[in-house]
Amino acid sequence: TPPPVMHTAQVCTDSLAALEHSTCGSDEAGLTTARTSLEGIVNTMTKVGNADPTTYDVVCARMILALERDMGSAGCTLASDAPLRERIQRTLEPVARVR
């Protein structure tokens, strides 16, 4: 039996990279917690194997936006770039239209 096909949700992967390059002077513990939470989502996704990566991208997009808002109010800087922001917006637009 071949192993399950692993799908990688691009927003999740890129969000993890952004968190790795983020800074949070006085609240490094909060940044570590955020990384751990997002890593848990990505690890779950890869263990499931053939899960729909779009579903995980929606979760990661919402989470990274919430983290960015919370981190900003705590004086932290999320290292997200324009391409990541565009992917997040493209990911969430269909969800917003359904509401």
Image (cartoon, rainbow, N blue to C red):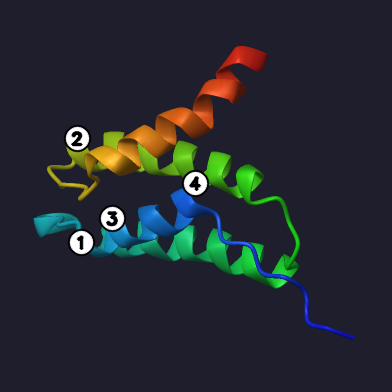
Q: Could you say which quadrant of the image residue 63 lies in?
A: top left
Q: Are marks 2 and 3 in contact (CB under 8 Å)?
A: no
Residue situated in front as seen by the camera: 92 or 64: 92
In the image, 5: left or right of 25? right
Q: CA distance from mark 1 to mark 4?
A: 17 Å
What is the number of the mark on residue 60? 4
The numbered mark, 1 or 2, whose residue comes first in the sequence reads 1
Determine which residue is flagged by label 3: 18
Q: CA distance from mark 2 to mark 3?
A: 18 Å
The numbered mark, 4 or 3, whose residue comes first in the sequence reads 3
Determine which residue is flagged by label 1: 21
The numbered mark, 2 or 3, whose residue comes first in the sequence reads 3
Q: Are marks 1 and 2 in contact (CB under 8 Å)?
A: no
Residue 51: x and y in percent read: 73, 56
Task: Mark 4: give few (<14), some (14-19) or many (20+) Cα within 10 Å.
Answer: many
SS state under label 1: loop
